[in-house]
Amino acid sequence: MTTEQCDLLVIGAGPTGLFAAYYAGFRGHRVAVVDSLPELGGQITAMYPEKQILDVAGFPSIKGRDLVEGLVTQAATAEPTYLLGRTAETLVHDEDGVTVSLDDGTDVRAGAVLITAGIGKFSPRPLPAGEGWLGRGLEFFVPSFAPYAGKDVFIIGGGDSAFDWALHLEPVAKSVTLVHRRDAFRAHERTVEQVKASSTRIITKAEVAALHGEGHLESIDITVDGETTSYPCQAVVAALGFIADLGPIQQWGLEVQKRHIVVSPSMQTNLSRVFAAGDINEYPGKVRLIAVGFGEAATAVNNATVAIDPGAKVFPGHSSEAG
């Protein structure tokens, strides 16, 4: 068993967590960041690194992986300790600090904890007809567009990810077909219209009946109104959403509403020295945007600073101020 010491432990290495690490350094803290994923960037890295993100201040449009790269570079100024591929299992808080135990036996002792774990651990919803096809033509995420060049691609789903991937793969693939079980979509209306205006074929009120191929995917059967049609297909992206789970966090004594941690205006939870920012938290009027998470991270770190050092000020002054 090993023990790590820090002033602030950030749980979650997505955009909010990375910005929190930078800001903790700005406040002069030693910071550690733990994440169950093996790479930095959270959902962006795992699910949509190629997606263009449109709601980050100062960037009319920025690719997901480029945003993460910039955040990692910014966070590096704080010289954080990264504890990746590890899950925070237990949390014990007392008057002097917080101890978080990880699943590899490491204990992290911190003056305060900031939870930025987004939706917690997540796993993709399975495609019933796709059992046994993962890695043989079926994927749940699109980390790179290059493998789809020249292929007949079928995207299953009607949400933002499905339409985003259809939009980006259309100029790369030989053909793109989007299949959805209903004729109404959950995706942003603007993206839906862009896909409809492209060469993408859209099949609604449909379900995947079967996948076929010798070793690797060669064709797909789609059923509409009881009639099944077979199409050439070398790649399927099952964008059916994911199952979110707060995991051990639910056992820490935090006040939780519908899988979100309730916080005060200072981003503090019902536990002293424990704060939450980003998609994982909840308060009246909450808006779940990356840009909001950045502001919440700064608010949380500044208020955590007083918990770590009662003699400190909540507001340190602007980072642009001279000396």
Image (tube, grey):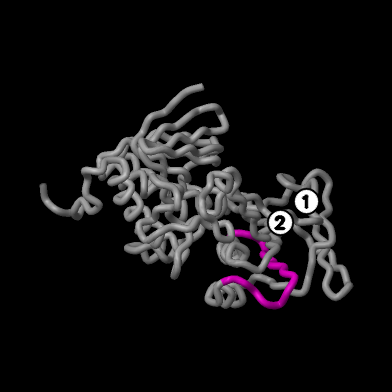
- Marks 1 and 2 in Cβ contact (< 8 Å): yes
Residue at image mark 2? 236
Instruction: For residue 70, say whether it is visible.
Output: no
The residue drawn where x is 36% and y is 33% is: 6
Residue 186 image-quadrant placement? bottom right
Q: Amino acid at mark 1?
A: Leu
Residue 45 is tagged as none
Residue 119 image-quadrant placement? bottom right
Which residue of the protein is positioned furthest toward the left in this rendering?
A: 323
Give the mark nearer the N terminus: 1 vs 2. 1
Residue 56 sits above or below residue 95 on the image: below
Residue 1 sits above or below residue 155 on the image: above
Between 231 and 211, the one lying in front of the other is: 211
Residue 217 is tagged as 1
Q: Which residues are magenta?
A: 171-187
The residue drawn where x is 23% and y is 53% is: 315
